[in-house]
Amino acid sequence: ILYGLHFCNLKLCRYSALLLGIVYGARRYAYLKPIAVEDRRLEAEEKAKQEELKRIAKALEEAQESILK
């Protein structure tokens, strides 16, 4: 009987730890998701700016080449 009681306590502890881990993970995900969305938005803006600068530099280079010819 003592062994059966001990086994039930272990199962209870394991499932409690599992449940707490799931709850913690869900809360952590909810906390980090808006931060990640903002980071992705800022990265997209920065990438668009860099592409625009590259496009302008390429246009200037082509204009310089056409002037020199």
Image (cartoon, grey):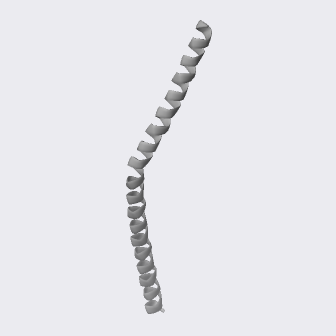
At a point 41% along the width and 80% down the height, the residue shown is 56
**With 60 as the anchor, is 9 left or right in this view?**
right
Position above or below: 66 against 52: below
Q: Residue at x 38, y 59 (%)?
A: 38
Give the side of residue 18 with respect to residue 49, left or right: right
In the figure, residue 24 lies in which quadrant?
top left
Give whichever of 56, 23 is nearer the camera.
23
> Residue 1: x and y, percent?
61, 7
- 18 lies above or below 32: above
Toward the viewer: 67 or 26?
Answer: 26
Q: Report the residue at 46% width, 33% height from top.
A: 20
Q: Position of residue 36 (x, y in %)?
A: 42, 54
The foreground one among 1 and 33 is 1
Image position of 60 with respect to 28: above or below? below
Q: Position of residue 21 (x, y in %)?
A: 48, 34
Image x and y of residue 8, in percent: 57, 18
Residue placed most toward the observer, 22 or 47? 22
Number of numbered tags placed on the structure image: 0
Q: Quadrant of residue 44?
A: bottom left
Quarter location, residue 7: top right
Residue occupying the point 44% across, 47% down: 29
Outermost residue, top side:
2
Residue 39's place in the image compared with 2, above or below, is: below
